[in-house]
């Protein structure tokens, strides 16, 4: 899986960092910071949950690059 984030859409709710802190964190202004673009497969469920919980849909989870 690959992850992208759109900081312009981020509203700083923090659901991503609370759900998958290994992958997401927040800057001082509350905006999402991606800690890894291709997390290990064992984090897939957690990352997908963070994507679903994001109120602004700033997180996109894509299939792994071939």
Image (cartoon, rainbow, N blue to C red):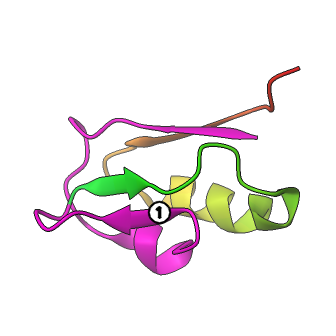
Q: Is residue 16 left or right of residue 14?
A: right
Q: Nearer the viewer, residue 26 or 18?
A: 26
Q: Quadrant of residue 20?
A: bottom right
Expressed as whole percent of the image width and height from the top left, the position of residue 62 reads 69, 32
Q: Is residue 26 above or below residue 55?
A: below
Q: Nearer the viewer, residue 9 or 25?
A: 25
Q: Which residue is mark 1?
A: 24
Q: Is residue 65 left or right of residue 20?
A: right
Q: Is residue 3 above or below residue 40?
A: above
Q: Quadrant of residue 40?
A: bottom right
Expressed as whole percent of the image width and height from the top left, the position of residue 12 reads 21, 61
Check residue 60 for magenta coloring.
no
Q: Which residue corresponds to the image point at 85% horizontal and 66% vertical from the top-left? A: 42
Q: Is residue 31 above or below residue 17?
A: above
Q: Which residue corresponds to the image point at 86% horizontal and 57% vertical from the top-left? A: 41
Where are the magenta residues, as a range? 1-30
């Amino acid at each position: 899986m690959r992850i992208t984030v759109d900081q312009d859409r981020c509203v700083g709710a923090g659901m991503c960092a609370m759900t998958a802190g290994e992958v997401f964190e927040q800057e001082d202004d509350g905006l999402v910071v991606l800690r890894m673009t291709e997390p290990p497969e064992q984090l897939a469920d957690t990352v997908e949950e963070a994507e679903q919980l994001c109120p602004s849909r700033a997180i996109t989870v894509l299939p792994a690059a071939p």
